[in-house]
Image: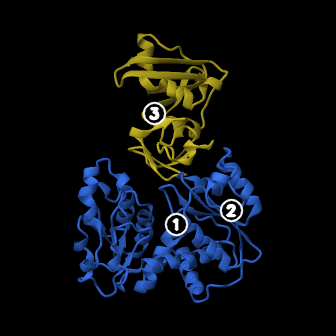
Amino acid sequence: MKNKSLVSINDFTREEHIKILDLAEEFEKQPTQKILQDYVVATLFFEPSTRTRLSFESAASRLGAKVIGFSEPGSTSVQKGESLRDTIRTVSNYSDIIVMRHPKEGSARFASEVADVPIINAGDGANQHPTQTLLDMYSIRKTQGTLDNLNIAFVGDLKYGRTVHSLVIALSNYNTTFHLVSPQLLKLPSATKMHIKEKNLAYYQYTEIIDVIPKVDILYMTRIQKERFSDPIEYERVKNSYILRNSMLETAKPNMRILHPLPRVNEITIDVDDNPQAYYFTQALNGVFVRQALLASILGVK
Amino acid sequence: MENNETRKELKVSAIENGTVIDHIPGKVVFQVVKILSLSEVTDQILFGTNLDSRKMGKKGIIKVSNKFFRPDEINKIALVAPNATLIIIKNFKVVEKKKVEVPDSIEKIVKCFNPNCITNHENITTRFTVIDKIELKLQCHYCEKITAMDTISFV
C-alpha cells in the first residue's frame, strides 16, 4: 500500500481493506504513536467539511505529523484562478501526502495523476468518499464481530448518497444481504445494483423503515435532502416516512446497531441517542483510527 | 458496393493507394473527419456525403490517399459510425476489407456528460473505459459516471 493513492474504494483490494481495519484496531488500543514525526501531511479542502478535516488532522496529530493546508479556498491562490493541476503540483513539493476534498467529481483521480506524492480522497463532489466507507466497515465489523453474511439496511436517499454507493460496493465482497429502504424517487441507481448482482447477492427493496427493523444487523440511516426533489409536495409527502424514532426499535435484534454518516438533521429523533443500539457518534470517532491507519500504511511506516 | 458504384458511375473518384472508409451514416461524415484529424492530412482526400445507399438510405464515404490507419486510430470512429467498412486500396485494387471495432478505451474525443466532472472545468484530456460495446456505455476515468449514446458529445 506504500505510496498508493486512495481515490475510490476499489483502488484497494479486499485484503488491503482488511489490513487497514486491523491497523485501525491497533490505533484504537493505542491512539498516540509518534511514528510520523518526520512527515508533513497536507489537508486541502477546496470546499469546507469541518468533520472530515478535523478527523484527518486529529489522526495526523496523534501520529506526530505536521499538518499544513487550508480549510476553504477563499484565502488561497485558488481564489486567484490557479488551476487544480498547479495547486496540487505545488503542494506536493511541500508535503509527503495530500488529503483533499473538492467539489468536482474526478478531481482526486486527476490530482493523483499530477502529484508526486500519494493522494487520499476526502470526497470529490458526489463521486467517492472512501475513508467514510472504511470507517463504516470498521464500525460494522466492530459491532458485529465480522463483515461476513450480515443483513444490512440502507435507509433514505439511496440515489444521490455517495456514502451509500461506496459502502454497498465494498460490502458486496462479504456476502451481504441488502435491504434498501427509500422513496421511489430515491432508489439505489442501477449502476450500484450491478455490483450486488455481479456477486449474486440478494437485495430487497422497501418503502417503510418499520418493515426492515426486525430483519437486520445494521440499520444505516441517511438524510433526505429537500433539494433532491423537483416537486416540494412530493418531499413533504415522503420526508416523515424516513424518520427513525425510538418507539420503532422494539422489534430490533439485540445485536442491531444504527449507523449514520452524520451530520444528522431530523431523520433520527433525539430519543434514539440514548438507546444502546445507537452507534453513530462512536462511528465518527472510529474515523480517526481508520485515518491513522491509512496515513501510516500509505506513508509506509506500518 | 464498390462494384455497384463503379457500374453506375463513381460518385467519388477512385484512389490509387490508401484507405476508403465506407458506410458512414450521412450525418456524421464531418464528425469522422474531425475524429480522424483529417484536416491535418496533406495527401489527397476525397469525400462524399448524402449519397444514395440501398443499405443505409443516405451514406457518406471518405477516401484518404496514402494513409493506412492504425487500429487504435480508426476504431475511434466506431462511436459515430459503428457499421463503417474500411477498404485498403493498393494499385487501385481492394486488398483488404474490414469492419471498425469499438475500442476498449477512448481518449480525447468524447466529452464527459457530467457537468460537474473535473474534465469539464480544467484542461484535462478525457479518458473513458468502454463498459458496454453494444449499447456503447463509456465510464469516465475521472468522475466514474457513465456517458451513454443519448448523452454523448464530442470535444
| Pointer 3 and pointer 1 on the same chain | no
What's the residue type where badge 2 is placed?
Gly
Foreground of the two, A269 or B39? A269
Secondary structure category for the residue under label 2: strand
Question: What x and y, as percent, mark residue A55?
Answer: 57, 72
What's the residue type where badge 3 is placed?
Val
For residue B107, side relative to residue A240 (left or right): right
Which numbered disc flags the more N-terminal residue, 1 or 2?
2
Secondary structure category for the residue under label 3: loop
> Is residue A281 shown above or below A204?
below
Which of the chains bears the disc numbered 3? Answer: B
Foreground of the two, B6 or A126? A126
Secondary structure category for the residue under label 1: helix
Q: Name the residue tied to disc 2.
A: A69
Q: Residue at x 45, y 82 (%)?
A: A141
| Pointer 1 and pointer 2 on the same chain | yes
Scheme by which the image is coloured: by chain
Q: Name the residue tied to disc 3.
A: B80
Q: Name the residue tied to disc 1.
A: A130
User: What color does chain B have in the rendering?
Assistant: yellow
> Is residue A120 shown above or below A88?
below
Which of the chains bears the disc numbered 1? Answer: A
Question: What x and y, as percent, mark residue A184?
Answer: 26, 57
Which of the chains bears the disc numbered 2? Answer: A
